[in-house]
Image: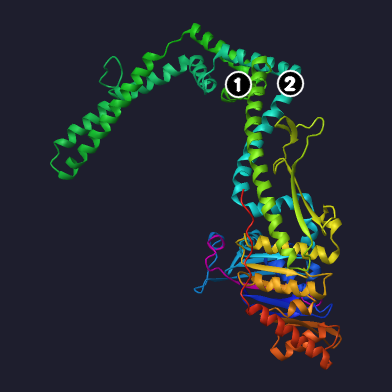
Amino acid sequence: MLAEMRIQGLGVIEEALLELHPGFTVVTGETGAGKTMVVTGLHLLSGGRAEASKVRTGMLKAFVEGRFTLDKAEAASRIVTDAGADIDEDGSVIALRTVSVDGRSRAHLGGRSVPVGVLADLSEQVIAVHGQNDQLRLLRPAEQRAVIDRFAGESVGEPLTEYREIRAEWLAVITELDERSSRSREMAQQADLLKHGLNEIDAVAPEPGEDVELTEQIKRLAAVDELRASATEAHAAVSGSQDGDPDAPGALGLVGEAVRRLATAEDPVLRDLAPRLEEASMLLGDVGTELGSYVETLDADPALLEKVLARQADLKRLTRKYAADVDGVLAWADDARRRLESVDTSDEALAELARRRDELGVRLAGLAAEVSAARGKAAAELASAITQELSGLAMGQAELEITVEQRPAEHGDRQALAIDGRAVHAGSEGVDEVELLLRAHDGAPPLPVHKAASGGELSRVMLAIEVVLANVDTVQTLVFDEVDAGVGGRAAVEIGRRLARLARTHQVLVVTHLPQVAAFADQHLVVDKGTSGGVTRSGVKLLEPADRVQELARMLAGMDGTETGRAHAEELLAVAEKDKSAPAPKRKKAKKG
């Protein structure tokens, strides 16, 4: 629920604080006073598009701040905590949106900077704004289908989710089959090239890193004499000459002599150095052994060198054609094998794809039929509920019908699906076309709602839809922006009555110009416009009972200065109060099945 909202620097509103009633709050004011800025502020808090033109002239930024209470709103609370924002001890959270004159926008939630999308996600759980643009949008076929799905809930939502998953796989198989069939010659040539490359690589059978190892081996074989001389001399320096010349004992013999001398020394300091020399002697012995082994392995073998060079030449032929090194050649081969699987144009491969396409098509048709059946059932229930609402909105003879028909597939439609022997178009939202039809009175033909209803009747139809949907929505706060446009007299009273009843289960905020609607509110806010120093400023104030009578009289064709106007306003308030205190009528439930 939206507990309060503060607006600063938005349009004509310099600064305003709206403390909202948990029931029915109405906002009124003269034309041009800035009533629509209240709804604009709500759109901004809901993550809507920010426009620099909405910033008040002379100010650098516009601010809209709202405090939402999240009692029992688990999904909304989860969005807040996932964003790293804080929920106050009383279960409320502060949302803030700023818009600068250069069009830049920032959002904050619970004292933390967040992406605007977080506010949009939060608003979907706690608030729904309905205006005249929403009415026009609802006349589109896609929006009418969405209304059915919203009303039906999981009975449509669950099979539709599975339908979308299967449809995505089905379309992918169709695309692959079409591509393989239409590009068979090109893909066959590509497959031949890939196979040739793989055969050439497999014939050489390179090992990972083999080119680097061969290079090192060739260097050793080419310089074997130099390496043998270096290793032999190093071995003699460490272990002594091979002929046992006592004058050339080597490092190992000299260290051994030093160990013997220190071990018999009288000074303990010298004796303590002997173990360290013994360690050096052991290390020198190991090195000497390894040098000797290395010399024995060196062999000037021209045949081996020639063999290694030939192997290197084979690898270089591959690296010139496929990659910079052997590891790259092996990676190319792996990729080529994967690509071969996708360019297989053999009859067996095409037949397998066709079989998979048909198998998925059967599953998709079953899910589409399940979605259609659920929509048909929901359409009947929704139409009955809306018709019942219309009878209470001075449209007693009107009857709403909702048709759900499967859309036929056109010639050449790649997304054609066979259901009960008919080819239908399998769109992302199913195979159904939904249309709202209105029978204005007995004997009248059912026509599309925008053709059968006048402007005032259309507003009442839209309100009836929203009232019915509100009973299935989890959103607690409902906002209506001049949903009563084009309505007056008795119908206006009925709209006010319906909004008041809706406010028994939801928080309702209504921007209106009709006194008959405003009279039913639990709380009345007025947007007041004034001029000072040539600058127009608007603010919002809460009306006391006496002021409320005067505002209703003003709304009654400017009758605020007459006794007749005040008497009429008082009468409206009395009728509304009596109606609100009466028990709510029970809705007749639509038959199931």
State how far apart marks 2 and 1 are (Cα).
20 Å
Q: Which mark is in front, 2 or 1?
A: 2
Q: Which of marks 2 and 1 is nearer the N terminus?
A: 2
**Image quarter for residue 478?**
bottom right
Residue 182 belongs to magenta span: no
List the residue tagged with mark 2: 181
Mark 2 Cα shell of 10 Å, populated few (<14), some (14-19), many (≥20) = some
**Image quarter for residue 414?**
top right
The region drawn magenta spans 55-76
Residue 380 visible in the current orientation: yes
Q: Position of residue 175 (x, y in %)?
A: 71, 29
For badge 1, the amino acid type reads Arg
Q: Is residue 214 above or below residue 51?
A: above
Q: Is residue 561 above or below residue 409?
A: below
What is the image's colouring? rainbow
Q: In this view, does 297 lie above or below 452?
A: above
Q: Position of residue 402 (x, y in %)?
A: 74, 51
Residue 541 visible in the current orientation: no
Report the side of 144 relative to 365 (left or right).
right
Report the side of 3 relative to 250 (left or right).
right
List the residue tagged with mark 1: 337
**Image quarter for residue 105?**
bottom right
For badge 2, the amino acid type reads Ser
